[in-house]
Image: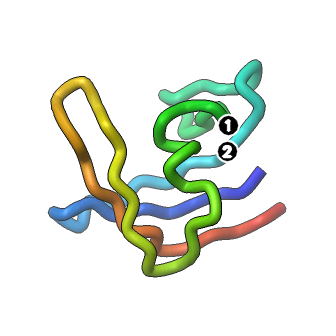
Amino acid sequence: GATVELADDDDARRTVTLVGDDEAEAGEGRIGWNSPLARSLRGAGIGDLRTVQLPAGPKEWEVIAVAYP
């Protein structure tokens, strides 16, 4: 799946690769297609802002880059 670079409000960067749910390993940056973050990224392009509901409350991410293998 796609590899997406994200930045939060503090400009902290995170890179995730969207994979099948059976291949997900969040600690290694592989998130399942049906996870809340992956669902929020569907259809997103560079510069788009996406908000994800986390247990601690909502978190906003900006899409910095999208790459496909």
The amino acid beneath tag 2 is Leu
State the image quarter where residue 43 is shown.
bottom right
Relative height, residue 66 to residue 52 (above, below): below
Relative height, residue 23 to residue 3 (above, below): above
3D distance between C-alphas at marks 1 and 2? 6 Å
Q: Residues within 10 Å of mark 1 (few under 14, many from 20)?
A: many
Relative height, residue 3 to residue 23 (above, below): below
The residue depicted at 39 percent of the width and 59 percent of the height is 50
Q: Are marks 1 and 2 in contact (CB under 8 Å)?
A: yes
Task: Give whichever of 21, 14 is nearer the camera.
Answer: 21
Given the current orientation, which residue lies at the most extreme right position? 69
Location of the C terminus (image quadrant):
bottom right
Query: Residue 4 placed where, x, y %?
Result: 57, 60
The residue depicted at 52 percent of the width and 79 percent of the height is 46
Chain-order first, disc 1 or disc 2? 2
Q: Which residue is mark 2?
A: 18
The amino acid beneath tag 1 is Trp
The residue depicted at 64 percent of the width and 47 percent of the height is 17
Task: Say whether residue 19 is left or right of residue 16.
Answer: right
Q: Which residue is mark 1?
A: 33
Query: Residue 66 placed where, x, y %?
Result: 63, 70
